[in-house]
Amino acid sequence: MSSFVIESTRSGFVESVHHVSVAVVDEKGALVASAGEPERIFMWRSAAKPFQALPLVLDGAADRFGFGPRELALSCASHSSEPVHREVCAGMLKATGCEESQLACGPHTPLSQAVADELVRQGTPFTPRWSNCSGKHSGMLALAKHRGWALEGYERAGHPVQERILDEVAQWTGVPRGELRQAVDGCTAVCFGLPLTAMALSYARFGVSELEAARRLREAMWAHPELVAGTGRLCTELMTAARGVVLAKVGAEGIYSAAVPALGLGVALKVEDGDMRCSPPALLAVLRQVLERSGRRVAVPTEGLAHHLEPVQRNTRGAVTGSLRAMGRLRFS
């Protein structure tokens, strides 16, 4: 079993080691590279969002309500609650005639520390629009309204919205409906448990699909990476630097998924202890090894990404105390 880890250092000492499981799969389902336990079942969490958004486009709801690339990008987002994110969400709700109170996602502290700090300074109460998943939920409400399904309970297992999404996830991952684990996500919607290899397969397929809905969502994420995550975050900065080369989406608890369309590859990884600090350097290290091994002239510009590749750690005075660094090699098939 190939060992791939993220080391956390402090003053030159390795203080902690975070093991990472990785699957790199081609569009036909062949395992190209791996580490750890690529067949182990993990929760996909927010890395599933592009596939949860597909029915919105496929079923005609996006066109009916005039959702363009910005709205589609936010439907796939785990955003930082910046003003632009809240603005696009509000526009989606207005277009569908829905109210913010109908969003089943609860509010939470913004993922952006700067936005969270500003909230504290201003004493601003935050509402469901501030949830990093409010774009996904707005899209789910739009699908329910378009199909004439009940708006109440749209986020729950068994509701037609979630059944429709379940069909889509099964199709793209190749995992039969009955074998997909279903659980409750942090935003109250359904999330899915499946092998890393199946997550990677879905992204490999998504990256090269000629299906119009997949193309529209891909292009929306590349056109508006600032809406998919936010200022200073890897999804946004990687897709800005490697627009059209890499499509990436983070998930909670140390999950990351990505597509490299030019190579026909999908990537899925899980930091096994769920440490979210470790997933950005893990993804960049995996991409670097895969691209180097491919021998193809496909490159991810690294300018501006160094702070994700080996993030520094600071103490309460802001002094650097160590860093996170990827160690180990993938096993190539």
Image (cartoon, rainbow, N blue to C red):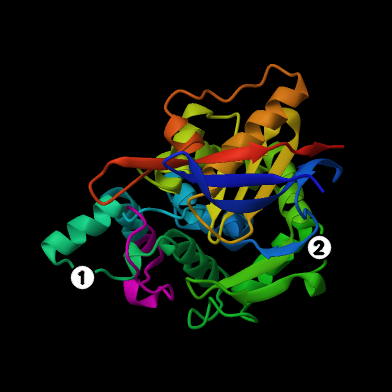
The answer to whether 32 is drawn above or below residue 63 in the figure is above
The residues colored magenta run: 92-112
The answer to whether 108 is drawn above or below residue 211 in the figure is below
Q: Give the labeled residue for mark 1.
A: 125
Nearer-the-camera pick, 66 or 82: 82
Q: Amino acid at mark 2?
A: Val
Q: Give the labeled residue for mark 2.
A: 175
Which residue is drawn at the image coordinates 43% and 76% (left, top)?
Answer: 104
Q: Position of residue 290 (x, y in %)?
A: 71, 31
Secondary structure character of the magenta stretch overall: loop
| Image quadrant in which you'd find residue 294 | top right
177 relative position to 71: left or right? right
The circle drawn on residue 236 is: none
In terms of secondary structure, where does tag 1 sit?
loop
Q: Residues within 10 Å of mark 1 (few under 14, many from 20)?
A: few
Query: If the image is split into quadrants, where does the C terminus sit?
Result: top right
Disc 2 or 1, which lies upstream in sequence?
A: 1
Q: Position of residue 230 (x, y in %)?
A: 38, 46
Nearer-the-camera pick, 43 or 319: 319
